[in-house]
Amino acid sequence: MSRFRAFALFGLILFTASNCSFWNRSLQQVLNDPFDNQGRADATKRNVYMAPLQMPRNIIVCRAKQCAPLKLSMSKEYIYNSLVQLMQNNNNQRALLCTADTGSHNCYMHYVSLPITVGITPAYMYIDYVKISDVHISKGSSSIKLVLNYNVTYNGQTPDCAPNRTLMFVKNTDNIVMEDNGYQCKMTTIGTTTIKTLFLIDYIDLDYGFIGGYYSIGLSGPAYGGGSGYMLLRLPNMSYPLKANFTAPEEKTKAQKKADEYLQAPASQEDASKSTNGVQVFPINRK
């Protein structure tokens, strides 16, 4: 009997040492669920939900190979016009997405990933590029209407997703946001999943076409989950006009100048006779 008590006491010590939440539970909870399976399931579910979104402190804009905070060197109208030109230059183009470092703006993963649950199966969703399908500008507005197509994959599968209507607006020099109402993806055989994206921009490089910021992506429906972090968009074209370098006409050489003078000079009588096969043409004086 004493040996049984010793084994029971030893097992109780191991259980409490391996589960630190034992002392935070009531006696009824221990009796109903000794191994705290429900708590572990809740913790796993919490990891699937979206992480908190960070707000940018300053918006850095780079132009002419120089970077500075937006509110110190540019106006709201200037950055809006630059973004309009950037988006128009990249209409019908693919913008690459990557997970980047907030300080150096260097990519360390060539995609954005987030944990989701498809039905009852845990999975990871990946987005590696987005295609800008249309750009629309409203008169007298500080927003840009975009139609985006995200390349969504999960567990090696590519679902059929509808185009995403996105609004990019410049509220002020401290707030540039991209958001949408959600787009539909067929990720399961039953029903469709809605994906919403929020992108808070804090870095714009007009020289090389980079846009960086904090993102938050959430899923609702048969597939649910989400996540947040910092990502970078790489646009193929910069914001400046594609043919912005105007070159002055080259100065003509002496030979070219002589040729022009020869062509512009009136033809002599001898040259005229040659051009008429030896027949001279005399002017007729009218009386």
Image (cartoon, rainbow, N blue to C red):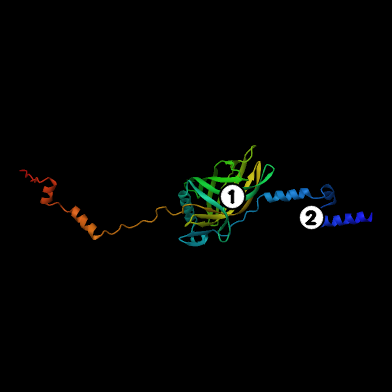
Q: Say which of marks 2 and 1 sits in front.
A: 2
In the rendered image, which residue does mark 2 sit on? 21
Query: Looking at the picture, how far across and down is residue 155, in whole percent?
Result: 63, 45
Q: Residue furthest top?
A: 190
Query: Looking at the picture, how far across and down is residue 99, in whole percent?
Result: 58, 54
Q: Which residue is at the front of the view, 45 or 169?
A: 45
Which callout, 2 or 1, points at the residue further toward the start of the chain?
A: 2
Q: Which quadrant of the rendered structure holds the N terminus?
A: bottom right
Which amino acid type is shown beneath numbered disc 1?
Answer: Leu
In the rendered image, which residue does mark 1 sit on? 198
Tag on residue 14? none
Horizontally, residue 170 falls left or right of residue 122, namely: left
Q: Secondary structure at mark 2?
A: helix
Q: Is residue 73 visible?
A: yes
Mark count: 2
Horizontally, residue 188 falls left or right of residue 16, namely: left
Q: Secondary structure at mark 1?
A: strand
Query: Looking at the picture, how far across and down is residue 109, in whole percent?
Result: 58, 54
Within the image, what quadrant is residue 103 found in?
Answer: bottom right
Number of other residues with Cα within 10 Å of mark 2, as a class: few under 14, some 14 to 19, many 20 or more: few
